[in-house]
Image: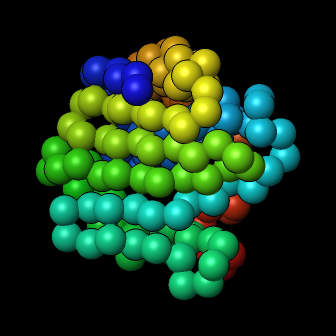
Amino acid sequence: MKTLEFDSQMDSRKKLMTILFWTNRKAARTEGCAPFLLKKIVTEENTYTPEDPKTLKLTDAILDDIVQSIDQDQPVKFEILMGTEYINAEIDGNIFTVNTEHSEEIEEEIIEKLDTELNKKFPSICESFKPRVTPNK
């Protein structure tokens, strides 16, 4: 398990997308083109799991709940599956924690990259990522 304490001025929605994008990107180094599957999201008020066996998308209601939790410094937990790698991540105030089942190297790479990206005014995020984790409109 690796932890990063950060001080970021970016809004919570952008913070969330940055964290999810770089978690996906760094896991892809070992897991290749495997789908990035959000298996569970837990906020103070709700637990979200996929309706079908494969995909949980970040709907506006889910995003609003997550952002509100982040804004109120309440923990938000994510369970992510990518290939054979199972990733547990948590945002709690200005602390991000990540734990992988198989590769501590992925944990280290995620933390190192987020340490850089979360302190930027405009973090580097691929524009094609958001449509993959949010429903098509």
**Residue 91, x across and y down, in percent:** 32, 41
Q: Could you tell me if residue 18 is visible in this image?
A: no
In this rendering, position of residue 27 left or right of residue 69: right
* Quarter of the rendering occupied by the C terminus: bottom right
Taking the spot 23% from the left edge, 48% from the top edge, the residue there is 75
Taking the spot 40% from the left edge, 62% from the top edge, the residue there is 41
Taking the spot 40% from the left edge, 26% from the top edge, the residue there is 1
In this rendering, position of residue 102 left or right of residue 65: right
Quadrant assignment, res 69: bottom left
Residue closer to the observer: 41 or 128: 41
**Residue 3, x across and y down, in percent:** 35, 23
Image position of 121 with respect to 31: above or below:
above
**Residue 119, x across and y down, in percent:** 41, 19
Q: Residue furthest front?
A: 102
Residue closer to the observer: 110 or 87: 87
Taking the spot 57% from the left edge, 46% from the top edge, the residue there is 86
Image position of 72 with respect to 8: above or below:
below
